């Protein structure tokens, strides 16, 4: 059986014994039916991972002896900050999961002119917690040890004003530009609109904020497809793919 990778919010130190959080404990003891002596790999999101051994395992309580730290999969040298319009259903979950697997460093859900999803108050906080857990689960699956930042939903204009990436791109199907494979930037901001795309004024605002218009070929890609294609291309040009 493949050795499970488990994220914990606790600071990990080699040789220590920790009690895992309830969700992780139930997953190991109940879903995977693991017992004392079985192996797991722990990571805390700060880089590095720890091959470890279960000391005690029951349905709601699992203790693990933390092993020696190893580097494992390191973060991409290209920091990609994705700003994407909030979409309905499972599309946002899909983007959060796959963008994490592809190595994005930061993701911000955006309210745009054509965003139909309304998130306020407790509903917004609940959604944010859910998206962060989606990213953590993706890290556990793909071997990534750094957890990307999942920011609270923001208005497009606020995100444009706050972005400090070295290079910036706005995707839309009417563009003709392509990323030039020249000097590698350290960071990139990538803006993707909702179904129906960004409005004309929004694209103009992005360009005024220093974003270059970027197209991904002749076909119109869905809002959950476009960022993943773009991230893969950018990682291939300047990252670790």
Image (cartoon, rainbow, N blue to C red):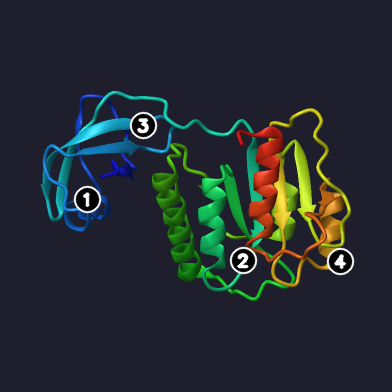
SS type, badge 1 = helix
Judging by the rendered image, the residue that carries numbered circle 2 is: 86
The outermost residue toward the front is 1
Give the label on residue 3, or none. none
Q: Is residue 201 visible?
A: yes
Among numbered discs 2 and 4, the one appearing first in the sequence: 2
Among numbered discs 4 and 1, the one appearing first in the sequence: 1
SS type, badge 2 = loop
Give the label on residue 200, or none. 4
Q: Residues within 10 Å of mark 4 (few under 14, many from 20)?
A: few
Please report contact status of discs 3 and 2: CB closer than 8 Å, yes or no: no
Q: Tell me where residue 193 appears, x and y as whole percent.
A: 72, 63
Q: Tell me where residue 211 appears, x and y as whole percent.
A: 81, 48
Give the label on residue 28, or none. 1
Q: Please give left or right for residue 111 compared with residue 18 in the image.
A: right
Q: Residues within 10 Å of mark 2 (few under 14, many from 20)?
A: many
Judging by the rendered image, the residue that carries numbered circle 3 is: 49
Q: Tell me where residue 62 appears, x and y as whole percent.
A: 16, 46
**Viewer-nearest of labels 1 and 2?**
1
Residue 42 or 125: which is nearer the viewer?
42
């Amino acid at each position: 059986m493949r050795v499970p990778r488990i994220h914990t919010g606790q600071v990990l130190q080699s040789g220590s014994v920790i009690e895992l959080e309830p969700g992780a404990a139930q997953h190991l003891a109940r879903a995977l039916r693991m017992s004392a002596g079985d192996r797991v790999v722990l990571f805390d999101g700060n880089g590095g991972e720890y091959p470890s051994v279960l000391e005690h395992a029951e349905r709601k309580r699992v203790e693990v002896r933390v092993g020696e730290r190893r580097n494992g999969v390191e973060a991409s040298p290209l920091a990609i900050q994705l700003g994407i319009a909030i979409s309905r259903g499972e599309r946002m979950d899909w983007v959060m999961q796959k963008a994490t697997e592809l190595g994005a460093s930061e993701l911000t859900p955006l309210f745009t002119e054509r965003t139909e999803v309304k998130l306020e108050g407790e509903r917004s906080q609940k959604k944010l917690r859910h998206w962060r857990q989606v990213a953590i689960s993706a890290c556990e699956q793909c071997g990534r040890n750094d957890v990307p930042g999942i920011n609270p939903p923001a208005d497009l204009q606020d995100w444009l004003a706050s972005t400090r990436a070295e290079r910036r791109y706005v995707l839309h199907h009417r563009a003709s530009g392509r990323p030039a494979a020249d000097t590698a930037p350290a960071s990139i901001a990538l803006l993707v609109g909702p179904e129906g795309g960004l409005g004309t004024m929004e694209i103009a605002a992005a360009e005024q904020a220093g974003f270059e218009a970027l197209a991904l070929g002749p076909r119109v890609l869905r809002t959950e497809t476009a960022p993943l294609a773009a991230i893969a291309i950018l990682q291939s040009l300047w990252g670790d793919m």
